[in-house]
Image (spheres, helix red, strand yellow):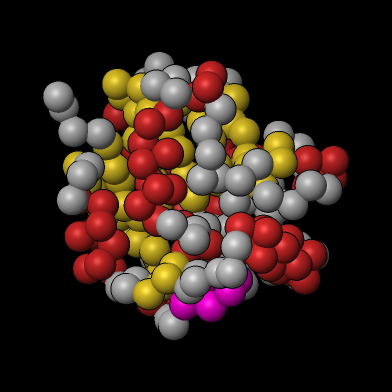
Amino acid sequence: MEIYKFKNYEEYKNIQIRGYNAKVNTHSWVDTNSIGGLVDYIFNYNPKVSFGLCHGTRKGMEQQAFIDYFKVVNKKVKVIGTEIAQDASKKFSNTIEWDFHNVKEEWINNVDFIYSNSFDHSYDPKKCLDAWMSCLNNNGLCIIEWTTDDENSSRPMDPFAASLEEYKELISSKYEILDILENNPKESKGNTTFTGLRYFFIIKNKEQ
């Protein structure tokens, strides 16, 4: 496990915004076919699902995919995406400018699901995970995507690097892993720049 050390928060934020500007029109990590499967999982777990968050969404493809797939099962679900770059909220639907290490008061204990393929962008993964898990309601699920790309050496744009086993250890030290799902890369859909195997950690708070 490696975590890149920044001089200060402003350096972290500036690098993330610079990366956003460089990739927003050319790169997408989102596999919409996988999101369709996640919608089925969430809906079967909690048919009353009504509100979700997607963190680190760049141009907002994931929240739109969640909204569209929930419509297929006749559910109108509000899904908000967060992006640290300011102009994303002006350009892309259902997006707010936000650092995903922080939480809004109205999110606490009030979110049905959280999804992110950007956990490797965290400068402090423990703080980040605690923030996300604090938002879940009693039926809430947090879904974190991992790929082999996430175990590469940490770097300014992707400061957190860890293996699949290290993700397991980090998450299970405090929270319950319900499932670890795999996608079929041959069935990937969407304008994704990654076509390899993806793993999805399905996480919930431990019962008190």
Q: Nearer the viewer, residue 61 or 117?
A: 117
Residue occupying the point 40% across, 56% down: 125
What residue occupies the far bottom of the structure in this picture? 153
Where is residue 23? Give x, y as percent: 73, 69
Quarter of the image for residue 78 reads top right
- Picture layout, residue 88 above or below residue 156: above
| In the image: residue 118, left or right of residue 175 | right
Residue occupying the point 47% across, 44% down: 115
| Magenta span includes 54 | no
What residue occupies the far front of the structure in this picture? 7
Q: Nearer the viewer, residue 115 or 30?
A: 115
Where is residue 196? Give x, y as percent: 45, 74
Where is residue 94? Give x, y as percent: 71, 34
| In the image: residue 85, left or right of residue 63 | right
Dominant secondary structure of the residues highlighted in magenta in the image: loop
- Picture layout, residue 20 above or below residue 81: below
- Picture layout, residue 80 above or below residue 198: above
Q: Is residue 194 visible?
A: no
Residue occupying the point 68% across, 50% down: 84
Where is the N terminus found, in terms of image quarters? bottom left
Q: Nearer the viewer, residue 25 or 96?
A: 96
Quarter of the image for residue 124 reads bottom left
Residue occupying the point 61% across, 46% down: 99
Bounds of the magenta span? Answer: 154-158
Q: Is residue 138 visible?
A: yes
| In the image: residue 85, left or right of residue 125 | right
- Picture layout, residue 8 above or below residue 79: below
